[in-house]
Amino acid sequence: MRKHTLILLVIILCIASTVRLVHISTNPPSLYWEEVALGYDAYSISKTGRDYHGNWFPVLAFPSFGDYKPALYFYAIVPFLVMFGQTPLAIRLPSALAGIITVYLVFLIGKHLKGEKFGLLAGFLFAIQPWSVHVSRVGFEANFALMLVTASVYMLLISKTKSYTIVISALLSVLALYTYHASRVVIPLLMVWLAYTRGHIRRTKWVFFSIGVACIGILPIVLHVKDPVITQRMAETSIFSGTNLIEKSNVLREADGNTFLARIVHHRYVVMGQTVVSQYLRAFSPQFLFLSGDGNMRHTNGMTGALYLWEFVSVLVGLYALFAQKQNTFLRSLVIPWMLISAIPVAVTTVSPHALRMLNAAPAYTLVSALGIWVLVQYVQEKYRGIAWGFTASICALFFVAFAHAEFVIYPKISAQEWQFGYEELITTLERLKKPSQHIFVTREQGRPSIYALWFTHQNPQEIQQQDGQLPKDQLELLAFGSYTFGDKIPNESNLLVASSPTYTPTSTKILHTISLPTGKVIWNIWESEK
């Protein structure tokens, strides 16, 4: 690597690190319950070798709240908990570091495909990509899985000259399967396709070795393929779960006279197929890609698309160049399947587009966008290319500043409630106000209060494990432990310290403490009940 390339790469990685690490503990403004669930189970593992339900070193997934989260990210958190304690930084840092590493991997892939300059361009675009920046600042398993997928792709690409790296690719692919549910769909399809297009089938020694590694790695998944530990999450999110599509089919048939033709046209399998196609196509929505993201305020800041608005042009030009220029044949055989396969998980689940389930496509979009810029600049006369690059840099800088303002200034204020803001203040205040032997009741309308109580009271996980069989639960969510009880109906008891939203607070009650959003809206009242 040439000296100036190394200098530019270091600058790009510094930019990537800055936008992913600055104020990471306070923006997003609070830990979401899924992050706290990851953190407390990792804390339990670090202290006892078991999750807080008492399962010894889970391999496939942690039960958590009955959604069985794949296991690897829990273990990735453990060393950071040891270093930084029970803090948002410990939970979010593995994702942030994964995002930074993925920037470097995108550079390496770009360099491998079209040289150092193209690699630098691709790495820079990914360093400032809104999609990657935002998800890297949250404890999202999907972002950690993306790093593994991208590393696996790179190792497979370079195995043409370094045959042993196909084994590393297989190992990284297996690890991704243990990190995020969507990877279990994307990885097998993407890796088989890339291995085939690279001609590695003829490399019997390393192919069979890598197949052996993959088979051993996926054996636990195969052995439990029908167990809830594997199937539960899909059952919760699949469009085929429940009877919605069947009922839709019946309604359409009745509305169309329930004739023979209507029964054919509106057959349940036809409706299911139409739904899958519709969900799949929505994954490529310009609204999602270039305007406002997927609509979930935890997945996007709502003011920027997954990509920048100007990338609408560079992506279109890049796609044209992939099919029009013969020198981009292999690049086309990589990025087009990468994008198409990455959208499959959202085609069969209830929400589309979904920034996390199709996150694997983010590097592919960056490579296409980089190619579009590359082609546009090449069309400019050589003596004006410096001006063209300067103009491109100015556009990038302008939109990046606007994105940074939205992400770091506006977003923390408008998204606080989406991140269940206020639980830390709530639990610490309850601990401060409670009297000796006083019971505490917290309403559940704001979601998962027990995991926050476990986390912010630094509850000894061994004590929770020992009582696991006796503690009341709702889908594995604790409804009581110690002096805490969580529920929807406030008990008619005296001397009970209660935390509830204003809606659940009696009008005549003396409020001991209120907790508000950054906007000033009161979301919690703390008060004592009187019989």
Image (cartoon, grey):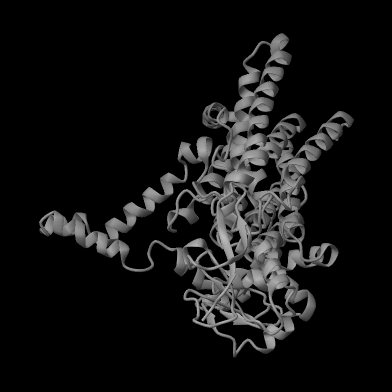
Report the front residue among 146 and 53. Answer: 53
Up-down relation of residue 394 to residue 112 (above or below): above
Report the front residue among 443 and 227. Answer: 443
Residue at image location 59% in from the left, 34% down from the top = 368
Please state the horizontal and vertical placement of residue 28, each as a whole percent of the image. 66, 50
From this viewpoint, is residue 74 visible?
Answer: yes
Please state the horizontal and vertical placement of residue 273, each as a whole percent of the image. 33, 55
Residue at image location 75% in from the left, 29% down from the top = 117
Please state the horizontal and vertical placement of residue 509, each as a whole percent of the image. 53, 68
Q: Residue furthest right?
A: 3
Q: Residue 528 falls in which quadrant of the image?
A: bottom right
Up-down relation of residue 277 to residue 369 (above or below): below
Report the front residue among 285 and 173. Answer: 285
Please state the horizontal and vertical placement of residue 165, each as a whole percent of the image. 75, 55
Q: Residue 243 falls in which quadrant of the image?
A: bottom left
Residue at image location 73% in from the left, 45% down from the top = 20
Up-down relation of residue 410 to residue 421 (above or below): above
